[in-house]
Image: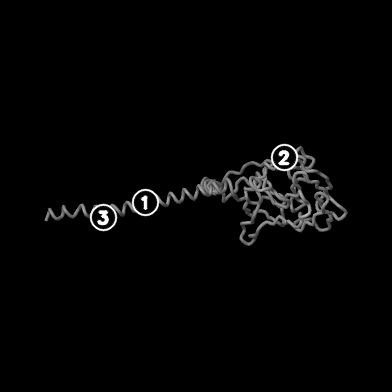
Amino acid sequence: MTHDLQAEAPSRDRSTQPRKRGWKLFIRDILLIFLAALLISFLIKTFLIRSFYIPSSSMEQTLHIDDRIIVNQLEPRLMPIEHGDVVVFRDPGGWLTPTAEQPPANWFVGAIDAFLAFVGLSAPDSNDHLIKRVIGLPGDTVVCCNDFGQISVNGIPLDEPYITIPDGSTKATRDDFEVTVPENRIWVMGDNRYNSADSAFHRDDPTGGFVPIDNVVGRALVISWPVARWSWLDNYPVTFHDVGR
């Protein structure tokens, strides 16, 4: 009897080994998939697309406060900026008022925000960027305003269906100006023309109101949140069709 029991014990041990090894392989595979997903998300955020939220009303009614947008970072790295593009860019110098960084409510919220920022699903640096519409490209002459209150680019008046102006106003923007966009710079304006600290607003600054193309993070492609406002962001090619470059 003793001999039989001793003979059976090794067989039970061998039967449990594949089960243990199976669970270990499963957990390892899950971890590898998770790490691969993190790496892919990080690379996508770094080189392809990333998310930003809208902190101000300067682009209403196209974009509302707290809208989430997806930004294509291939522009202008690999794709040229076009007239009418809505672009996100870093402050060219003195456009943003310095604000004190608000600490997270607790360490857990801070850790979640950091993780989401790492994979590109959150944008804690949105307040350090601006978003406007490209009106003038290098070499363009931009003038406001003609007898009908329109902005002209290279002598072509723009019919701008995307702008918001106050009731009773007849001009596309508050102040008159005439500028020629230097090389490697762009002229940008908010769609909410009378409530946007844009190129026209900053034209007397040291920047001259121009934004270096190197400061452009990318072109805003789509409103991703809230779901009710999901839509592609148009660059209105018909408006700029005859402007040329």
Q: What amino acid type is highlighted by mark number 2?
A: Gly
Residue 184 is situated, as x and y percent measured from the top left of the image, at 72, 41
Find the residue positioned furthest to the top: 206
Nearest the camera: 38 or 67?
38
Find the residue positioned furthest to the bottom: 228
Q: Mark 1 points at which residue?
A: 25
Nearest the camera: 66 or 16?
16
Residue 48 is situated, as x and y percent measured from the top left of the image, at 59, 49
Q: In this view, does 178 lie to the left or right of 38?
A: right
Q: Nearer the viewer, mark 2 or mark 3?
A: 3
Q: Whole-Å distance between the Cαs marked 2 and 3?
A: 71 Å
Q: What amino acid type is highlighted by mark number 3?
A: Ser
Q: Residues within 10 Å of mark 2 (few under 14, many from 20)?
A: few
Residue 155 is situated, as x and y percent measured from the top left of the image, at 83, 50
Q: Mark 2 points at which residue?
A: 94
Instruction: Tell me which numbered mark, 2 or 3, is placed earlier along the sequence.
Output: 3
Quarter of the image holding residue 101? Answer: top right
Q: What amino acid type is highlighted by mark number 1?
A: Leu
Q: Which of marks 2 and 1 is in front?
A: 1
Q: Mark 3 points at which residue?
A: 15
Instruction: Tell me which numbered mark, 2 or 1, is placed earlier along the sequence.
Output: 1
The answer to whether residue 105 is seen in the rendering is no
